[in-house]
Structure formats: C-alpha cells, structure tokens
Amino acid sequence: MNKRSRLFLTLGSLLLLGTFFLPIWSITVEAPQYPEGLGIYIRINTVDGQHPNDLKNLNLVNHYIGMKKIVPESIPELVFMPPTVLFLMITGLLVAWKGGQRLLYAWLAVFTLLAIAGILDFYLWNYDFGHNLDTEHAAIQIEGMTYQPPIFGTKTMLNFITTSLPAAGGILAFCSVSIGYAVAILNIREMNRG
Amino acid sequence: MSKTMIRVLGLLISIGAFLLIAECAKKDKPMLGSDDAASAVYVAPGDYDEFYAFTSGGFSGQLGVYGLPSGRLFKEIPVFSLDPENGYGFNEETKDMLKTSFGYIPWDDSHHPELSQTDGVTDGRWIFINGNNTPRVARIDLRTFETAEIIEIPNSGGNHGSPFITQNSEYVVASTRFSVPIPQADVSITSYKENFNGTLSFIKVNPDDGHMNIEFQIMVPGFDYDLASGGKGPSHGWAFFSSYNSEQANTLLEVNASRNDKDFIAAVNWKKAEEYLAQGKAKKRPAEYYRNYMDHRTHSAVSELNKSVMILDPADCPGLIYYLPTPKSPHGVDVDPSGEYIVGGGKLAAVVSVHSFPKMLKAIEDEKIIGEAGGIPILDYDATIAGEVTNVGLGPLHTEFDGKGYAYTSAFISSEVVKWKLGTWEVVDRIPSYYSIGHLMIPGGGSMKPWGKYLVALNKMTKDRYLSTGPELAHAAQLIDISGEKMKLLLDFPTVGEPHYAQGIPADLVHPKAKKIFPLEENEHPFVTMKEADARVERDGNIIHVYMTTIRTHFKPDNIEGVQVGDIVYFHVTNLEQDWDIPHGFAMQGAKNSELLVMPGATNTLRWEPKQVGVFPFYCTDFCSALHQEMQGYVRVSPKGSNTPLSFN
C-alpha cells in the first residue's frame, strides 16, 4: 500500500473511536400521545432513552402487549461489543502500519463478518421481543399480532409507528469499513495499471 | 298641496326615519371590533398563544391562567382556597399552606397578581398575589404553576394594596385597607382616631429562592390604604401608596369618607427606610404570623411561626415618607415606564392627577410643605403636579402604559377605557367596556417594558354578554388591540371568580421553563415509596401508614386487610411514573376530605378515618391509560379489637 492508502486506512480505523461516544442505532416510536417523541439509542455498551426516562416509559408502554422489558444489564452483547470494536480499530491501525494488501483483505473479511453477525443478532433480539410475549399478563392481546421492530425502516404496530435506523456511531462504523473497501479497490486498480 | 305643507311633511318623514334608524342601531349590539377581529384572536388547533394572562380569582381566592389573544382558560391555580380537584389544602402535604395565626383558613379574596421583575422587566420566575381578608401574600412558582409560599401580614386589616413589586423584586409591598388597633386591643370603635393605625409592609424577596420575610413595617395614620406601585428608573428606591378616608371615619364611609376634596398618595423612600433600619431606628414589636412554604424536596409544606416584626415610626425617621394630596379618594396609583410620573386615579373626581417625581424631589428640597398628618409632611399639590387629565371619564380607577408614550385609564362609572398621552395629558381615544370596568391590563403594562399590543379590560358586570346562567353570571373580560392609533375590540370572554387585576407576559418567557415531571430520585418525602417492592402497610398503635405506589395501571398494594374502625389511615401515594402528563388520582370511599391527584414523581398523603365495618374500594380518578378503569383496590375494615391480622398484597 502506498502512503496515501495507509493514511486513509489509519483515519478510517480511528473513525471507530466515535462508536464509543455515539449511539450506533436508533429506534423511535411515534404515537398521538407522544408529540414530544419517544425512542431509544443502542450504544455499543448500553441501551438508553433518547430523552430522560424514555427507556422506562417505552418499557411501560410495552408491558400492555406483554413485551419483555429492555434491561441493558441482561444483554451480553453489550459486554462483548466494546472489546470487539476496539479489536477492529487496533487491527485496522496495525494493517495501516504494516501496509500488507493481504492483511487488509483479512481485516475487511473479519469486519464484514462481525457486522453481518451483529445485524443478524440484532434481528434475533427484535424477533424475540416481538414474538415471545407474556400472554399470561398482557392486557392487550390481538390475535395473530406480533411486534417485531424493523432493522432498517418504518413499521406501524397498533398506535405506534416504529422507525429503526443507524445512528451516528453506526454510520461512522459503516464509513470505516467503506474506507477499507475503497482503499482495497484503489490498490487493486493501481496494481493492474502498474 | 302648498310648498310649506310639503316641507313640513318632508321634515316629519325625516324625523321618523331618523328615529327608526336610531332605534334599530340601539337594538343591535355595538359592532364587535373590526372585521378582521376573528383572525386576530384565532389560535389554530395545536398552536400556542402569544401571551399568558394571569387573572386574580377575587372571591374564589385562586389565580386563573389564560392565553392571549385566544382568551382560552388553561388552569386555575389554587392559592388561598381549598381545591378538592387536586387535593390542595386537603392533603397532608399542602394543608399547612393555609395555616394562619387564626388557625386554618380555607378561603381568601385574592385581588392583585404581580409578576417578578429583573431590571424593571417581568422575568417569568414567580407571580405574587394578595389575600385580602386574612392578610397574606402568596408566591406562585412559574415552573410548576403551584403555590410555593404564603406569608401572613401582621398588624393589618384588609390587605388590599399588595403585592406590588420593586424593579428588581427586592420587595413586594403591602398596605392596610382597614386600619386597626396596633397591636390589636379591645377598644371602642368610636375611638378610631386615637387608637387605629395603618401599616405599610415591605416584604423582602430572596433573589435565589424567592423566600419572603417581612423586613419592616411603617406605622401610618389610620386612613384606608388602597393600592400601591413601586418606583422605577429614577424613582427606584421609592414606593407609592394611595389612600382614602383621610377623614378617618369609622362608620358609613360612603358619605363620611368622601368629604375631603383631596386624600393622599404616600411616597415612601424605602432605601432611606433600610438606612434607618440599619441604624436601629426600628422597634421590634411582638406579632404572631405564619410563613408557609413548600419544600420542593419533600413536596410538603413547612410552617414557621414568626413572633416579632420591626416597625418604623415616621416621627423618628425624617424624610422617610411624604403625602402627596390627590383628588378625590384616589384608587389606583401607577408609575409610568419611565419612572417619572405617578398617576393617581381620582375615583370620585372626573380627573386623573399626575405627579412628577422630579418635581416631588424639588418640592421636598424647597420645603413646599403645607401641613402634616400624623407627623408625616404634606407636600403642596401645585408643587408636585405635572398635569391633570380631564375628560377622562367618570370614576377613573387604574392606569396601564403601552411603552409608546400613552396611558390607558379605566373609568368605572362611564364604563370605558380612555387613552391619553403622557406629557400633553390629552385624551386621544376611548372605547366602551361591557360593563363597568375595574382594572385593565397590558402585558408588562406596570413595568418598565410593556408589550403594548393587547389590553384586557376586566369588567365588574356582565349582564347580557353571554348565554344566561341564572342570577350568578361569569365576569367578563374584553381583549382590545392597542397596536394602532385607535383601540379595536377583538374578543369578549368570560372569566372565573372575580378578576380584579391581572398580569400578562410573553409565553416564551414562561412556557419553555415549565416542568413536565418531578424526578423521582429527587423525592425526599418522609413517606416516599421509591419502588413497588417497598410498598407496604405498617401499624403504629391506631395509626396505619400505607406506603403505596402507582404506575400504569395498578396500585401496590391494592388489597389491604386488618384495618379497624377507629384507626387513622394515611395513604402515602407515590406516583412512580416519569412520563409527561401521567398523574394518577386516588379516591377512597367515605374519605371526608378530597381526592389526591399525584403528579409523576411526587408523593401525596390522604388521611382516612374508617367509621364503618365492611370492604371499601379505592380507585384512580384521572384517566391515565387504556386500563384506567382497572386501576382499583379494596380495604377491609374490621370492628375495633378484631383479630384480623394486618396484611396486604
């Protein structure tokens, strides 16, 4: 890799630092009773409300349909995620330092696999929350109705319109891996030319 | 027919037509404002009003909150009167707010709201209001719209002339409408002239938390002190009090107190009073009076009994106070935004007298003194007067200002608002009120910065303005556009209680600061239940404490057994919600007080003394969610001495 590629890769890896401060995913719900908005942020180490008390209030609203409470402490992924991201960042920096093309491909493969695994895991959690309802205690039970939030996009469930989108941290991670791919492609082109 | 005949007929027809038209015109109500009045007051669904208006409740003892220009009522804030709607004065936390040296007083007559000011501009922190009957001043916190503090005024009867404010909220002042023996004593009423006095009270306001204390009182001759106004700008450091009954009559005042051509506006140099106080000129006199305030951490009232007050005697304090003669039984005294003019509404004169503050200072310097009353020098009328506004209508009462050089005076008898120009004293416009206007209000109209867009006329009589509600009618207010040269009537709306004075403030100085919830983690109520797992019932002799929580959509506990006839049960209900606009109610069958309406994060306590054996339900009164109707519980009451154990779930 040339100097410029290594510089880009260094900056791209450092973008991952942002995920330690910024939420990676956002889930918001809209309803007539919540003109001020209600939503949660998924961060790499926790889940919290977009306004104070939002998590508590979302759990309160969800209890009517028998949905499990979102308790960040009981989600193991939130423990694994920070070291994983740290690992990706450090290895990214190492790749930039060493400058090996093969190392870069390996790094991209690991990053991509982890990202796919993460999104799949997110889907499974959403599926679990949306389907495994406490039918014993749910006050509102509608035949055939499930409440799985989307991974990406908007879905209407009863009186709530739920929107799920990557947040700033998630976008930074996407940029980071995209820079990696861009560097790889540029290098291949350069090699072909040279 | 002769020409003369035709002329006579023509004349007759003309007269007839004129009378007919006049009659038709009389039958139609006067045109309501201009053709675009409807759009001027229309606030579209979901939009906000431009101003808050706070109207005193008068004999309701409360404070009304309206929006302008729509005239929509948002809330009645309970201040001096019980409010079963939210438990104010009934629940254990707030009942001490109504404690006085006369015991618990469930009502008062509230006349004059006054917003706090910084640098002469309304700042939206607090609003003060007087209790007229059992002399008190209350402070309402505009983050919660709840009464935060009530202080009793000792040595007073009829606390009418209050609570008017100084330009940095250093003081709110109060004056006695009814002079009384000071200290109170068993004397003949006919000894009025010897034994009765008035007081002017200066209540210091702590700039950080708003807490009030009576810094000093000034003992004054036994006239009826009516209204007041703080100086501003050049006159900052002075306060002005109107008075009538300088005759010192004690019976049939309508005749006996209306003999003198002039009564007085008392000009008090309170900066000088502070100096005299520091020099030890004030006497500490015994006086019992309460100060009650809400401790925001415990959501509970704290009552303090004060036992003395500092009193200044004008005889010991030269230069402290002067009387400005003012025609005739003046009612309102209002200082203009520049602080230069002191406007006296000559209630029984058809004239408004305007004193000049610089001329007053000059008259004091030149010793233009024409006599004295009770040791207080009386200044020469001609030496202090800046101008008289004539043709100002009959019964001129109160004056507000638009900040553009104009003053607006209410005339009770001629039922109109009269606009006149400061400096030239010319009347430039007038508009009728429906009917018999008392106070009038321009947002900021008594401060250094009026927002001179709207004026609200607060009328004493309603008659035919609205659909009838029998002999007792709502009072009427009229919204008048004062942004142009001519006043325009925009809207007519009914008001609750009897609004006397009102205050207005741009909504953006208050609305963004309003609280949505009380953070649960800050709740330090001695009987708080922070989580459902801590909900419990405890017996201590015949006292039972129920530590209860509410959250959508249940009480914890909701079944209680082991209560006996003769027990005193305290339900300490903590609302665990932390969501906007989710209060829970609590109502207990047979409770002789009221319901509770518990705000998110707060704790309220209802006292209940079960008198009958049986099982009695309680329930949530505020429609809190889709399962509100399921939010209920039972208390089993056993006979006294029963061995049913205390239990709950």
Image (spheres, coloured by chain):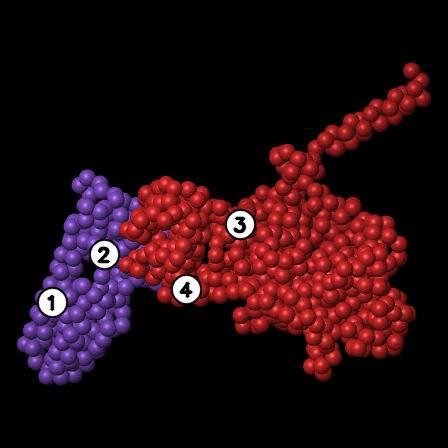
Q: Nearer the viewer, mark 1 or mark 3?
A: 3
Element under disc 1: helix
Identify the residue at image location x=16%, y=83%. Answer: A3
Q: Is residue A171 above or below residue B331?
A: below
Q: Colour of chain B?
A: red
Residue A19, image quadrant: bottom left
Q: Secondary structure at mark 2?
A: loop
The CA span between labels 4 and 2 is 30 Å
Q: CA distance from mark 1 to mark 4?
A: 52 Å
Q: Residue at x 74, y 70 (%)?
A: B218
Residue at image mark 4: B526
Image chain in purple: A
- Name the residue carrying label 3: B83
Residue B425 appears anywhere in the view? no
Q: Is residue B71 visible?
A: yes
Q: Nearer the viewer, mark 4 or mark 2?
A: 4
Q: Residue at x 78, y 27 (%)?
A: B20
The disc placed on residue A69 is: 2
For the residues labelled 1 and 3, say whether their Cβ atoms are less than 8 Å apart: no
**Circle 1 is placed at which residue position?**
A114
